[in-house]
Amino acid sequence: MIKFNEPPYTGKELDYIKRAIEAQKICGDGKFTQMCNGWIEKQTGTTKCLLTTSCTHALEMAAILADIKEGDEVIMPAYTFVSTADAFVMRGAKIVFVDIRPDTMNMDEKLIEAAITEKTRAIAPVHYAGVACEMDTIMEIAARHHLVVVEDAAQGVMASYKGRALGTIGDFGCFSFHETKNYSMGEGGALLIRDEKNVEKAEIIREKGTNRSKFHRGQIDKYTWVDLGSSYLPSDMNAAYLYAQLEMAEEINSARMACWERYYTNLKPLAESGKIELPYVPEECTHNAHMFYIKAKDVEERTAFIEYMKQQGIMSVFHYVPLHTAPAGMCFGRFHGEDRYTTKESDRLTRLPMYYGLTEETVDRICDKVKEFYK
């Protein structure tokens, strides 16, 4: 069976975990956590990066920093993972879903302004498949309406928009290092903070509401409880696993891009004949080959395709069920405008195997089976 995903592994992970253990500092903010934070800050240009236990927790921190309160509204696409919404729902906000663009599967920036009310406090664009949303338009709308922008860049590490790293354009950006992502620590994430004024409060929130970070830097002689917060620090052993991959980020990215391009070249004739659709990457976006998907004619064809591929020993999967159709989505949110594309396009999309270590021969075999199905 060709797996849909295999967690990235470079060979240095066990050695680095051993080093973390030998340093007798395996809780949060050890040497490897600090090195990961520094690598991300240098790579992206963000003012501050704080490694977290998950992208979900990074989003929760962003919601607190954005001062989201009960009754506030947050605009986002319905085609996303539940964490994008959960982070704001837990603060008492109402989610306002808008339709997606059928080309990128990202939130349609042209529909945002009409969804804004006097209760709107934030916009949460989601960079699907590591392909950026139309951030110039989103930031311009946010500036005019005095809204906070929280980028869900869970899939966007090493991707950019007009040369700017995803996660650094809005007020806050959130990365994921889950085992299904391009770079992994098993479970993990990161909060990227654009403005210096938000750094100290973010450190306090992440350290259970205490000023412990300042204590460790020697800025105060004892620490105490100063604000609300929780425990968002990952173990340094997890960070050690991640750092082994960040050191090889360019190599991992290049290998994934080669697979993505091979898929695209192999399957382009099927797209040109109108049998499938392939991913679209706007000119101003640099993606990171987080995934490769195809779009079938409809949900019936997709179901048959996934079953056929399974019979051939290849795991292919569909992705998000739109949040506005879920029980919690109907309870905690509302869809603004018409669902022209969200449900229709999500019903057509199938993700093909994509991971570091996927060989050219395996990609070719997968493409051959895709072509066989469409004969």
Image (cartoon, rainbow, N blue to C red):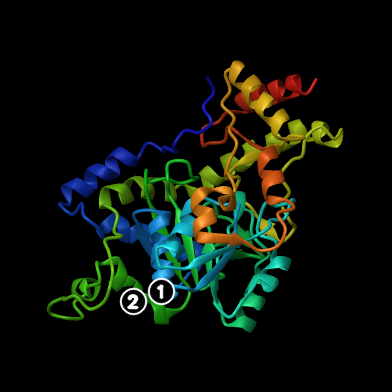
Q: Position of residue 255 (x, y in %)?
A: 57, 39
Q: Position of residue 9 (x, y in %)?
A: 41, 37
Q: Select label 2 or label 1 by which is in front.
A: 1
Query: Is residue 157 something that shows in the picture?
Result: no
Say which residue label 1 marks.
Answer: 65
x, y (%) of residue 182? 50, 45
Q: CA distance from mark 2 to mark 1?
A: 7 Å
At horizontal 59% and vertical 30% (from top left) the residue drawn is 316
Q: Amino acid type of disc 2?
A: Lys
- Closer to the camera, 287 or 97? 97
Q: Nearer the viewer, residue 70 or 31?
A: 70
Residue at 37% x, 36% y is 11
Rendered position, 67 above or below 33: below
Q: Hey, what amino acid is under mark 1?
A: Leu
Q: Residues within 10 Å of mark 1 (few under 14, many from 20)?
A: some
The residue positioned 23% from the left and 49% from the top of the image is: 20
Q: Is residue 249 above or below residue 334?
A: above
Callout 2: helix, strand or loop? helix
Q: Residues within 10 Å of mark 2 (few under 14, many from 20)?
A: many
In the drawing, does residue 5 fall left or right of residue 235? right
Q: Secondary structure at mark 1?
A: helix
Residue 201 tag number = 2
Q: Are marks 2 and 1 in contact (CB under 8 Å)?
A: yes
Residue at 61% x, 45% y is 289
